[in-house]
Amino acid sequence: MFSSPKLSRLLSAALLSALCLSNVNAQLSQNPDKFLGNITTRYQVDPGGGVPAYYTLWNQITPENESKWGSVEGTRNSYNWGSDTPFNYAKSHGFTYKFHALVWGAQYPSWFTSSLPVSDRYNAIVNWFNKVKEHYPDLPMIDVVNEAVGMHQQGNPLMKESLGGGGKTGYDWLIKAFEMAHERWPNAILIYNDYNTFQSDTQAYIDLVTALRDAGAPIDAYGCQSHDVNNISKSDLQNVMARIQNALKMPMYITELDINIENDDQQEQQYKNIFPLMWEADYCAGVTIWGHVYGATWVDYSGLYKNGNPRPAMDWLIGYMKTDAAKTAKSPFPGGKKPISLYIKPASTTITINDTLPITVRATLHDTIRTVNGDKDTIRIDSIKLYVKGVLDTILTKAPYVARYVPTTTGKHDLKAVVYTNKGNTYERLGSFRAHNPRSVYNNDTIKLPGTLQVENYDKGDESVTYHDNDSNNQGDANFRTGEGVDIVTGNGGRAIGYTNTDEWLEYTVNIKEAGYYSYQAVVSSGTTGSGFRLSISDDEGLTDITDNISVPKTADNDWSVYTTMTGRTIVPLKAGEQTIRLTITGSNCNVDKVIFNHVEINESLNLSVTATPASGTLGSSNTFNFTAGSAGQDSLISYIKIFMNGKQVTDTIKSQPFHWTYKASTAGTISMSAIAVDTLNRESNITAFSLKVRGPFNGAIGIPGTLQAEDYDKGGEGLSFHDSNSEKEGDDTDAKNYRSDEGGVDIVNGNGGKVIGYTNSGEWLEYTVEVKRAGYYAYSATVSSGTTDSGFRIGLMKDGKETQLFSVSVPQTANNSWGTYKTQNGNIKTPLESGKQVFRLTITGSSCNIDKILFSFISDVKYVTPDDVKANGTRYNLGGAIVGDDYKGIVIIDGKKVLQK
């Protein structure tokens, strides 16, 4: 943690005015070292509606959505810098701002998909960083990575793969992101930000940030979002804050504070309970409240201004910020800027005992010129003391600051670097590494390839050396290698690894007899969905994947005893000789018995391409795939085609020309496929990967008459069953954001007692498979809300790729700047609906409406009255035979024809 007791006292008024928190007296925070910030409100800085101007309250701003990748580069190579508005506002009023966020598994453009090669995705991320640097060369604070603990965001595996994977540390992709940020913004405060840090996922959060810190990543602070503090007690918050800080010893930000309580008195009391603890912690550098206008925040009741008036919690906050405790609370960043970049980077986070470990202390002072009594003075590093396990090991006086340490005992070795300047300032950074005994092969028998890798026979060694398991408990039933934490079970007539969790891994020393490509047969099981693993070569350079993710299907419902075989081929050739293979769990809850490897001869000139008709499918319909394979134009060399679906070879191979294959989809969603051509000499072609998007109803066709729930759009994916302007799920709390989170960026929020579609933009659309039970005319009742004007949508009938409009709905402003108040908009459909299954498309025609549901009610099997019918001569009768006039409402008979007279 940074400690600089003299710096803020000695800084001149001129220098202080140039720092990030220069204009503090204009806002609630009158502390020169800490900010009290907020976010934009529906893309606006000053929200209006009687709420005071932003700069009179807050002295830091974070764009809620404007600086996220999907918002900026929704269309590839086209940039919308909506974040200019809040950032320029901050500059004009002299306070600081934060970029949110560079890497986020819930937010990336819709064009950034798994169908792009990994290299293309990596280059796209690099380009994104470069464009941000080009546009904002001097950012003061950056959320470099947002919400990467476990599966906090469903897109994390895609981002992880794109940035190089977990690697040797398990967090290499995150380290890479921070290094990329530090290269471009060396003076910025680089932050890791996540939620559920105080109540649910505290240890996982600590573990992740510790891993980044100990690997030497340039992370300067940790951000606690604080969405989980609605009901936390004062003592519990105090304890958990101390627990996190004692483990990390780094600056903290409270980044997304909201107290979502409808009752005014209860909200005020909770602010009183927890806010002083956060603000007055000397390691807290600032607090950002996540929205202050009631009804215009991402949750329903967190706003501090309601109908333009402050709620009691806001009145209390205004008073508290005037107290001496608030004004004088200490900060790790005097003036709001980091005085030093300080990171301990061991050459490796693990090392064998008696080997030499280089340890680099990366230390760079910022603002090295200070002015005292009108005279300029230079601050420089005098020395750095490096402590290992609490004992001074080395004093470093010259850059680069590199020490060399030889561990003689196993276990964790804590590190501490203390930087001393010539002016008496000191700064500290913690770190650690682990020392272990030498590794050895299991049973003194190196695994030979071609051959079988029995997964329970991983190398002998220590945790984090030859294996990593999330806990030390051996949950298996096989009573095998019980002194280690790996979970081994009985299964498939022998042993297998089980009780697996994402990011656990095992390593195996193998002897590869023949260089080249290998096919594999992985014998696996799972009682659930989403399981998987991948294989990599582990060496001093890190990890090199030799397979794509091997998806393990649900082989039996809640039964892991039923095994199946997944087949495929290595994506890179293997080198001959002794290698280390790592098996990494990418999706929890799979059992892995063994992997059988066979050498494959490759025909380098043999090429394969695939086309599909149609390119996307409908559930239950057939798609024909055409395979074109050739070697220097000689198709006669082809013997057959092997086809793989979701990592498993299909039973039928194509053995005759022309090479056609017809597939009828039985499940909706995206189906991953690949194919290999085999020539007459049994040599194989390149692997050609392709996919099929299949649309189908979410949970069966929606019955009409009945209710269409807006969130229950068809399965299929972007461009097939829906279109969203970006891939970001701008939804509500965790429950709403995770609802259908694997299907793309449709924005689902909490509302009206359930889930609704929100954050809508003009041109977005959703499709629904409906089944009209009774042909005829229908009325509709749409339950909707909007906090603005000009919102709306239409419903159309899709047939043969063409839309026939059925009706449109204008959504009124249901409450002043509030989306929490719902109304019904009613009307009749002028066109009769045919019976049977059909597809409705809901298209947003005016942004910013929330749509809960649409109730379709049957009216009649007769047509509506038309102007011609109204003008028709003849006496009008009701169904009872009585004569009625023009003002009668209902079904009438004119000249023997039934019509509906309105």
Image (cartoon, helix red, strand yellow):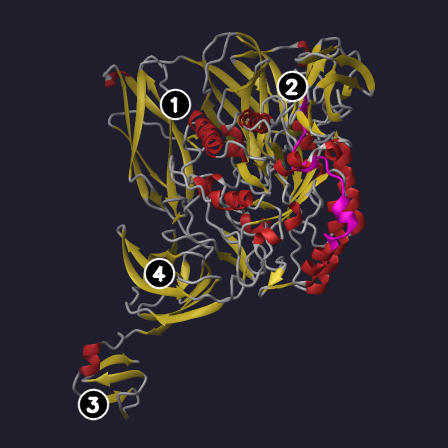
Q: Quarter holding the N terminus?
A: top right
Question: Spatial distance from mark 4 to mark 3, Cα to Cα?
Answer: 37 Å
Residue 605's image quarter?
A: top left
**4 or 3: tag closer to the N-terminus:** 4
Q: Residue at x 59, y 20 (%)?
A: 582
Q: Please identify, in this view, whether the residue under mark 4 or under mark 3 is nearer the observer.
A: 4
- Above or below for 888 versus 63: below
Q: Please identify, in this view, whether the residue under mark 2 or under mark 4 is nearer the observer.
A: 4
- Above or below for 163 versus 406: below
Question: Which secondary structure lies at badge 2?
Answer: loop
Residue 480's image quarter?
A: top right
Kind of residue indicated by mark 2: Tyr
Q: Are marks 1 and 2 in contact (CB under 8 Å)?
A: no
Could you classify mark 4 by the number of other residues whose Cα lies within 10 Å: few (under 14), some (14-19), or many (20 or more)?
Answer: some
Question: Spatial distance from mark 2 to mark 3, Cα to Cα?
Answer: 92 Å
Q: Nearer the viewer, residue 118 or 832?
A: 118
Question: Label for residue 458?
Answer: 2
